Image: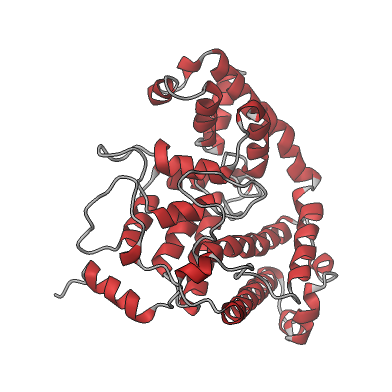
């Protein structure tokens, strides 16, 4: 048997990937230098460390939109993450980017999320308003840099610069300031692909879960302008012969494929238009490279607005807000009054960190059901 050695994989990357792809052999390295693995590249090693982390496993029991216990088939934070990784890898392969780096960033991008979805994040953000607030991307970086404790040689997972940068520069309304990353430089295209794949995934699966829950209906979706393309592509002719789950699946497949294909075409056009040939020209590009086409973007904006108004703000989901606020608020107050109620490792962190930050670290790492269990104990 001939082993696929790391040095051979790196050579293949140099020969086959695009000039603007991030090569494993040219990674900017780790905060704590380590010898390379004989078989796995640096980015493959990062991916494996992420999958084996505690924070990654806990996403199985963290809310995406619907509480996991409402039905076994609704997405959780983990299944969302897997869908993002699959879409990201497809896009990376088509653009001749580094699939291993893309996958690593996709798998790690949500490990800092709180229990109870974005509502949980909003509650923690309010509780930490005097300590800089709470943001799940910043928390993801904190998880991989500090909170995961799997190795005696260093804190955190000691991931490569490129994966950590992909977390720090994941696009949100909150700009993360970190001394390791130049805010004026764009991240790798692999990181940008994950950003938009994240949106494509949740647009698709939130429609799927929304239809499955009965909160939204197909007739409502047909009023959206994204359907003008659907009619041109003959989607109506396909779905009119289908019913139930198959009709819903066909609809979601169409939308995910539409958005993914559009982004790939527009990204390719931007690469040609801006003359992107290497990492440096990518990082200093004057415009966004990975994006929807001007034709599709307003349709996606309309779709997102529809989901926000009809699904995320539905009384059934908004009912979670008060309970989430009560659960997280009660936990926070109890740990604030008596920090020793937290596990020893978090009590040790109090020697060097603000109490509110440590409490947020502990609560953000909880699964929905563990937070509920502690809440019932404190009530």
Percent across and percent down for residue 367 are: 52, 38
Quarter of the picture holding the N terminus: bottom left
Farthest-out residue, left: 1
Judge left or right: residue 354 versus residue 207: left
- Observer able to see residue 7: yes
- Observer able to see residue 86: no
Tell how many labels. Answer: 0
Percent across and percent down for residue 22 are: 41, 67
In which image quadrant can residue 360 be found?
top right
Farthest-out residue, top: 337
Q: Nearer the viewer, residue 169 or 253?
A: 169
Q: Residue at x 66, y 29 (%)?
A: 129
Q: Nearer the viewer, residue 98 or 288?
A: 288
Judge left or right: residue 327 versus residue 359: right
**Rendered view: 148 above or below 192:** above
Quarter of the picture holding the C terminus: top right
Colouring of the image: secondary structure
**Rendered view: 320 above or below 109:** above
Percent across and percent down for residue 206 are: 67, 58
Q: Residue at x 57, y 39 (%)?
A: 114
Percent across and percent down for residue 103 are: 44, 62
Q: Residue at x 65, y 44 (%)?
A: 118
Judge left or right: residue 315 versus residue 99: right
**Rendered view: 93 above or below 237:** above
Q: Residue at x 58, y 24 (%)?
A: 331
């Amino acid at each position: 048997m001939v082993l696929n050695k790391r040095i051979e994989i790196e050579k293949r990357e140099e020969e086959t990937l695009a000039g603007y792809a991030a090569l494993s052999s040219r990674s900017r390295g780790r905060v704590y230098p380590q010898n390379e693995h004989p078989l796995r590249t640096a980015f493959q090693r990062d991916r494996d460390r992420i999958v084996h982390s505690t924070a990654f496993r806990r996403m199985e029991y963290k809310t995406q939109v619907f509480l996991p216990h409402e039905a076994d088939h609704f997405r959780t934070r983990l299944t969302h993450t897997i869908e993002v990784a699959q879409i990201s890898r497809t896009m990376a392969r088509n653009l001749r980017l580094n699939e291993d780096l893309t996958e690593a960033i996709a798998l790690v991008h949500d490990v800092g999320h709180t229990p109870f979805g974005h509502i949980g994040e909003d509650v923690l953000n309010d509780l930490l308003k005097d300590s800089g607030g709470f943001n799940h991307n910043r928390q993801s970086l904190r998880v991989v840099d500090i909170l995961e404790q799997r190795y005696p040689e260093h804190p955190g997972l000691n991931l490569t610069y490129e994966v950590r940068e992909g977390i720090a520069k994941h696009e949100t309304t909150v700009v993360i300031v970190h001394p390791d990353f130049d805010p004026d430089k764009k991240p790798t295209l692999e990181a940008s692909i994950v950003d938009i794949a994240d949106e494509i995934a949740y647009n698709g699966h939130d429609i799927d879960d929304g239809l499955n829950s009965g909160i939204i209906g197909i007739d409502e979706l047909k009023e959206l302008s994204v359907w003008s393309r659907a009619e041109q592509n003959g989607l109506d002719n396909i779905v009119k012969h289908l019913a139930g789950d198959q009709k819903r699946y066909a609809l979601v497949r169409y939308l995910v494929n539409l958005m993914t294909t559009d982004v790939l075409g527009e990204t390719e056009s931007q690469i040609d238009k801006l003359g992107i040939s290497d990492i440096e020209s990518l990082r200093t590009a004057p415009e966004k490279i990975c994006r929807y086409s001007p034709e599709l973007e307003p349709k996606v904006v309309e779709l997102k607005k529809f989901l926000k108004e009809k699904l995320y703000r539905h009384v059934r989901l908004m009912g979670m807000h008060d309970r989430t606020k009560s659960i997280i608020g009660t936990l926070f107050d109890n740990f604030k009054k008596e920090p020793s109620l937290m596990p020893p490792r978090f009590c040790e962190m109090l020697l060097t960190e603000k109490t509110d930050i440590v409490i947020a670290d502990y609560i953000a790492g909880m699964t929905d059901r563990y937070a509920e269990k502690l809440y019932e104990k404190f009530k």
